[in-house]
Each structure stands twice: as structure tokens, then as C-alpha cells.
Amino acid sequence: MRYNSARALASPPLQLNMFPDEPALQEKNGAVYTKPWVVEMILDLCGYTSDANLVDAVAMEPAAGAGVFVCAMARRLVSSCRRQGRPILDCRDSLIVRELIESSAEETRTRTLAALRAMGVLIEDAEMLTRTWIAPGDYLSEGSSLPKADFVIGNPPYIRLEDVNSSIMAQYRSGFATMKGRSDIYIGFYEAALTQLKPNGVCGFICADRWMLNQYGTELRRHITSQFSVETIIEMHTAGAFESDVSAYPAVTVIRRQMQKAVVVASINENISPSMGVLVADSLSHLRETGHLVNPISGMTAGRFDTWFSKGEPWPCTSPERLMMLKYLEQNFPPLESFGTRVGIGVASGADNVFITTRADTAEASRMLPLALASDVAGGKLEWSGHYLVDPWSPQGLVNLAQHPLLSAYYRRHETRLLERNVGKRNPAAWYRTIDRVNHDLLGKRKLYIPDIKSRIFPVLDDGKTYPHHNLYFIESEQWDLEVLGGLLLSDVAQFFVECYGVRMRGGYLRFQAQYLRKIRIPNPSDIPEHLALLLKEAFRARDVRLATSIAQQLYRIDQIPAGDYIGN
């Protein structure tokens, strides 16, 4: 894929109404302000330190907000300049700052001016530097007009593309190949920042970490792993990184323009002391260089990894302990879709109120498909509720309505509703089709059902009596005894995989989608001793998670599963 963010975009007039005001994650047009100790830590991790030659480097702050990064960078820049005995105005080309909202840019100038004056910079020099450095502007629209940078550091705004003015949104999407699907605007900031870097240049951002896991971050992850080196990731979900209390799932990422080398993954929790920011940066830098964490820090865990994920794979970085366990399991066990095993999803109709009924005489008996709903497996066993899919499919394709008068009469009564669907508009000759085609071979097969939305993984056996609705995923296998596999999937080990790769919804629920289920690793069924297989079957039938987990730990050769926010609940 070719990335074209380096080309200049036509810069639109700056408008205060380009973005709506949304207080949930945006104090001011997407701004969530970073605490000073976190800023200092990020600057240290990036090597933007006063003992380096910052004067001859170029540093970029792409979304200044209230100026907390800019003030810290200005202080370090001035100190670096003085250490070299150079005139202060040598720094005028060393820092570039952009802020979309002109009033915020002016606020940043005022604060930066005060910071320079506090360091004894003459008023006329301080005013010249702040005027030169800081300008209102849309970073995503300036493109290649900006100089290449040694450092791009900051806190990009959090605004979903759907909340951006439609013409600006179209411009961003055309300019940044990584902004796919339900992307957030910070995806564009990452791509623009990485494009701006010189060789060996570094980007240090604190940002929501959802892009590391979600589908909309796939192209950004692919872009990074193809051309850059991930150096450090620090998960800070509970560390209080921002001045306001927001549910932004923040993480610090340090990414360098070079070939991939060792990566440090750390987790900082609410027990970290703000006074420890400098020590955190020193410890993590030493860990990445030597492989040793010399000074354990209360409130922080960290690990070093010699390999990283490839292409667009998700980056499950909730904690170094969990990542170590994940890498061990993925290196030693094959994925779930091995040994003749397949994961799929049930049928989506596009009009459930038409296609699903409890009346068995709605159409010809051959057209009434017993349908399992998520509510049918809520008790741990399949208890069919008597729902049917009014089925328009045969193994050969859509049925001929002329040959099924009851089915035809039923669909004709609902023809207007069915034609309103997108699938009906796209296929006017097949207006009565469901979105998904029915695979009739699946009906008679034994399979495991897993509800889409649950707090934990919940496999339930179907003996071949029903067909799944789209809120149920299914697992079928040629080699597994499905009750043995069901016992493994009931365990905390299976839950661990989905916890690592999945994203929690509001209320603490997980999506058990096929893409996450396929990440689960399994032993070879022929390697499971008979007595352990029997215990797994017993655990599955009794819904005994503790027993299932105990047996799974033996089979995976692990002593314990690293705890997460919800593991084992």
C-alpha cells in the first residue's frame, strides 16, 4: 500500500466550528490535557533532553492545546542552547508548533513567553521566538510544507471522523491512507508525524490505545511495522495521565524511523508517584538497551521483547506479563482453526422481524429452519425457544418463489419492508434474500455456540438440531470431541486470549467475535491424555470454570495466568 500523507493538502480556512464541542472526551475541540510529569517522561523517552544538541534539531508539536508540551520543550531547548554557549535566537528554527484553534495558539504563546521569561530570556528575544515557533494551523492539512523533523512529540486530539465537518473529513481520508473505517482523527496525526520524521527521527505521543487493537487501526499498524521501529509502549489506563478524568485508555508510544529493534512494554497504574516520571524513563531506556530493569518502581511493571508483531496484527499491550504469556502460547500452540476446526457466525437477515418467527406454519416445512438465538444458550445448555428462520435458500441458491406458494405469499406481504433494505436495493431481483446465505450442511452438525456479547467466554453444545442466529458464533471440528474442546474454551486460558485482543464495551462486556476467537491457541487433541480429556468434558458439562482452568494450565504447561482487569470473573 502506498502512503501519500507526505503530499500537501489544500489547506482550508481555519474555522472554530470545524469540530463540535463534546465534553466527554474533548475539553476543547478534542483536547485532553496531559499532566506535566507525563510530558517530562515522554520527552526523556524520546531523547529530547537538554544535554543533547536540540538547537540543530527540529522538533514538532502538532496539536499544542494549552501548551504543556511546548513549554516543557522550550525550557529544554533553551537549556541546551546555553550549554553550548550559543545565542538564544539560534533556536528560532528548532521548534515548530501548530494548534488548530487560534485562541488556544495564543494561550500557548502566552504561556511559553512566561516560561522563557522565567528562564531569564530577554523580552524581545522571547517574543520573537514565540511568534516564530507557534502558529495557528491545521497540522493534517499542511503536509509536506513542513520541514522534516527529528522529533514529533505531543498529545493528538481525540475526535472521531464522523464528528468532523464532512468536507474536512473527506480531505483527511483522501490524504491519509491509514484513516480507514470508523477511524479517529488521531490516526491521521500518527501517519502525518511518522511521515515527517527524518531517518532515526522519533515520534512520542500519548494517545488513546484503541487503535492498537481495533480494526480501524489495522492500516496504521501495518504502516508502522513496515517502516518504523516501535521502541516503547506504556499502558496508563489508571495512572491519571490527564488533567481531567476521562475514559480515554491512554498509552504512551515511542516510535522511531529505523528498522525494528527491541521493544519495551510497560504498565503504570494509579500507585505511581508523579515524582517518579524521570526514573521511569531512565529505567525503561536502560531496559530496552540492556535487557535489565535495574530499579523496580512501585506502580510499574515492564518487560523487553526482541520481536514485535508484523503487518497489521493487533498489539495486545495491556501489561508486559500478559504479553509475555501471549507470546509464549502463540509460539508453542497452533490457532483454534487447526485440526479441522472452523469458526463462523450465524445468519444475518437484515429484517429479523420478517424472517424470524415462532409460527411453524408460516411457510412450507422445508422453508422453516430451527434457529438458535443467544437467549437460547443463556443457561449453559441449548434450550431452543421455538424460533424459526423463514428460509429463502436451498443448497443450490435462492429458491424459486413460484414453487413455494406459502413462502411466496408470506414474503409478498412484507415486500415493501424487504425492498427497503440495502441488500434488497442492491439485488432487486433477489429482494427476498437474507444478508447471509444459509449453509444447510451446518444444521445437522454438532457444534459449539458462543454468544457474541458476554462478560466471559461461554461455549454451549448444539447436537445438530439448530442453525445459529448472527448473535451466535459457532465452532465445528473434524478432530475434536466438542465437549473436550468446550472445556478448554470454558477456561480462563481461552478467556485470556480474548481479553488480550478484544476491546471491552461499556458495562464491561466483551465482543467474542470470530477474529478474536481465532486468536485462541489450542493443543493437539491427540496429545491430551484420556484422563484429562474426561475431566475437561466433566468441567464443560458442569460449567466448572475452575476445573477447566486447572486442566488447561496443565495442558498449556503454565503455572498461572497473568491477571487482568476481568480475568477469572
Image (cartoon, rainbow, N blue to C red):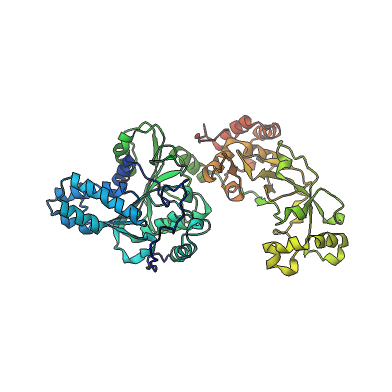
Residue 345 in picture, x, y percent from top left: 67, 51
The correct choice, above or below, for 120 with respect to 276 in the image is below
- Quadrant of the rendered structure where residue 224 is? bottom left
Q: Is residue 155 left or right of residue 430?
A: left
Residue 7 in picture, x, y percent from top left: 38, 68
**Number of numbered tags placed on the structure image:** 0
User: Residue sitting at 53 percent across and 54 percent down?
Assistant: 215
Q: Is residue 8 left or right of residue 111?
A: right
Residue 156 in picture, x, y percent from top left: 39, 52
Report the quarter where the C terminus lies. Answer: top right
> Is residue 73 visible in the rendered structure shown here?
no
- Quadrant of the rendered structure where residue 504 is? top right
User: Residue sitting at 77 percent across and 46 percent down?
Assistant: 464
- Quadrant of the rendered structure where residue 193 is? bottom left
Q: Is residue 548 left or right of residue 279?
A: right
> Is residue 540 visible in the rendered structure shown here?
yes
Residue 243 in picture, x, y percent from top left: 38, 41
- The one nearer the camera, 346 or 424, is 424
The correct choice, above or below, for 46 with respect to 147 in the image is above
- The one nearer the camera, 318 or 83, is 83
Query: Residue lying furthest left in this view?
Result: 85
